[in-house]
Amino acid sequence: MIFAIEEINSSTDLLPGIKLGYRIYDSCVSVPVSVHVAFELTNGEDPLFYEGMNCSRSGVVMAAVGDAGSSPSISVSRVIGPFNIPLVSHFATCACLSDKKQFPTFFRTIPSDHYQADALAKMVKYFGWTWIGAVHSDSDYGNNGMASFLEAALREGICVEYTESFFRTDPQIKIKRVADVIRRSTAKVVLAFTAVGEMKVLLEELALDPPPPRQWIASEAWATDPNLMRFSFCAGAVGVAIQKSVIPGLRNYLLDLSPSEVAASSVLTEFWEDTFSCSLTESSSLRLLRELSSRNSQSVAERKTNLLL
């Protein structure tokens, strides 16, 4: 986000004569946190983050970018929409957000799940899998996505043995029940219209007592997540994925950041530690050694002072 804004501000073609300021929030994939942020955005002027010769000094929020999730995006849009503040999401795919009567100021750069559901149904039909099971996140993303898929599946003549919904914070007994349905089912193909969080807890439960071989079909939220591919029974998963692209200049921007700039951001710290297999945080043992060293230095200094006195 910071890189993109700096690129816009330094360009003579994009928004000439205008400098963008910003404030970045982490919604923590939480609707209450997102709503709290939305009220902050609409509750008066924010402090300035850019000052230049031609700056208007106005900190009024003109637009918001986000959220990644559909449910937080729905909540934020309902709060800031009446103030005519546009919300532009890069990852909220719920088809419900296309309803301009409910969300007149919502826009996105990713297609609606209406198209994904249709594509998934056509793919299932293409491979001849006409008897399948289905699981989905118990959220706006999962519920609406599965409803769209079931409509498309009916048109394609695909029969669904079961549909199970769950959320990552559900009691373990419910997650186990969903896993048991998959284990006992006769369908050898399972479509999962889930977010990464839900898929992770489901796969961890299935790994405790692996079911017979199943062919997994993935929605775009988890189709390319490398952390989920470590589960052997997901190695052959197929699904819909977002096209990968290279952002010119972003690599050099990240590599040119100083350690202090990286350490100031939890996101960049995680990125650097994963990329370079290092740790930018001081270990507890190292902190203890420094504290002991500091105390010893103080003690020596005190003894020297006493001797002088």
Image: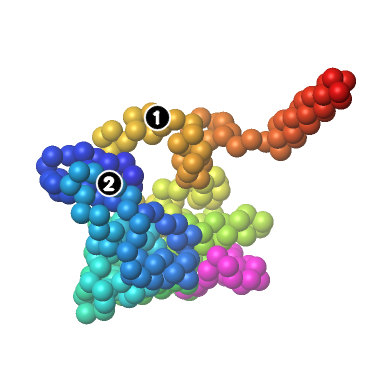
In the rendered image, the residue lying farthest to the bottom is: 101
**Which amino acid is tagged 1?**
Leu
Residue drawn at x 59%, y 70% is 170
**Which amino acid is tagged 2?**
Glu
Quick one: 176 or 248, which is closer to the camera? 248
- Check contact, mark 2 vs mark 1: CB within 8 A: no
**Mark 2 to mark 1: distance in Å?**
26 Å
Residue 262 image point, x, y percent: 47, 37
Residue drawn at x 48%, y 57% is 196
Residues shaded magenta: 163-185
Q: In this rendering, would 306 be left or right of 32?
A: right
Residue drawn at x 57%, y 60% is 201
In the rendered image, the residue lying farthest to the front is: 309
Q: Residue 263 in magenta? A: no
Q: Which mark is residue 299?
A: none
Q: From the viewer's perspective, is residue 4 above or below residue 167? A: above
Q: Is residue 120 visible?
A: no
Quick one: 287 or 1, which is closer to the camera? 287
Q: Which mark is residue 51?
A: 2
Mark 2 or 1 closer to N-term? 2
Residue identifier under label 1: 255
Q: In this rendering, would 217 be left or right of 294?
A: left
Please name which of the two marks, 2 or 1, marks the residue nearer to the observer. Answer: 2
Q: Residue 181 in magenta? A: yes
Q: Residues within 10 Å of mark 1 (few under 14, many from 20)?
A: few
Quick one: 302 or 204, which is closer to the camera? 302
Tag 2's secondary structure?
loop
Residue 284 image point, x, y percent: 71, 38
Q: From the viewer's perspective, is residue 35 above or below residue 22? A: below
Q: From the viewer's perspective, is residue 272 above or below residue 69? A: above
Residue drawn at x 45%, y 48% is 225
Residue 175 image point, x, y percent: 60, 68
